[in-house]
Image (spheres, helix red, strand yellow):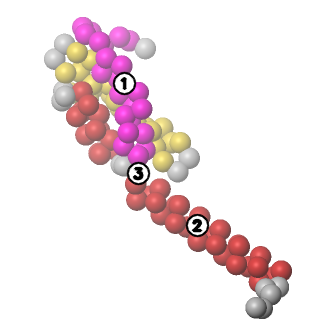
Amino acid sequence: MKHLSVKKLVGIIVGAVVVLAVIALAAIFALRVDGTEARQIALDTAGGGEVISQEVSSEGLWNEYSYKIVNGDTWYDIEVSGFGNVTEMESGTGQYPRD
C-alpha cells in the first residue's frame, strides 16, 4: 500500500473541511425563515390577531424576530428564531404593558 505524503494528506484534510463548511452554510441558508414566515409563525402561535409591533435583530448569519400581537383582550410577546422556532412567549390579558 502506498503512503501518502504529508502535503497530500494536509490537502485532503483542508479540502474536506472546506466541503463541510460549504455544506453547513448551504444548510443554514436553506433552513432559515424570512420575516414573512416568522410573522405567520407568531400569528399562528397567538391564534391570530393583529401585529402591533415587530422587531428584527441580526444574530450572525440569521435573524431573530420579535412580535407584539393583540388578539381580542389577550396580548402576546413572541420571539421566533431564524430557523422558525418560537424561543420565547409571554402573554397576558388587558392592555399591553408599556416597555
Residue beneath disc 2: 20
Q: Which of the two discs, 2 and 1, labels the residue nearer the N terminus?
A: 2
Against 61, residue 4 (above or below) is below
**In the image, residue 49 lies in the stretch drawn in magenta:** no
Question: Which x, y percent locates residue 36?
Answer: 29, 45
Question: What's the distance in space between the residues labelled 1 and 3, CA to CA?
Answer: 20 Å
Against 50, residue 59 (above or below) is below
| Residue located 43% across and 14% down the image | 99
Question: What's the distance in space between the residues labelled 2 and 1, CA to CA?
Answer: 35 Å
Quarter the N terminus occupies: bottom right
Three-letter amino acid code at disc 1?
A: Met
Residue beneath disc 3: 32
Three-letter amino acid code at disc 2?
A: Leu
Q: Tell me the element at label 2.
A: helix
Q: Which of the two discs, 1 and 3, labels the residue nearer the N terminus?
A: 3
Q: Tell me the element at label 1.
A: strand
| Residue located 81% across and 82% down the image | 7
Question: Which residue is most to the front?
Answer: 1
Which of the 4 image quarters holds residue 65?
Answer: top left
Residue beneath disc 1: 89
10 Å crowding of disc 2: few (<14), some (14-19), many (20+): few
Callout in the foreground (2, 1): 2
Callout in the foreground (3, 2): 2
Residue 19, visible in the rendered structure: yes
Question: Which x, y percent locates residue 40?
Answer: 25, 40
Whether tag 3 and tag 2 are in contact, CB under 8 A, the answer is: no
Left or right, residue 46 beside residue 23:
left
| Residue located 29% across and 34% down the image | 42
Of the pair 1 and 69, the residue shown nearer to us: 1
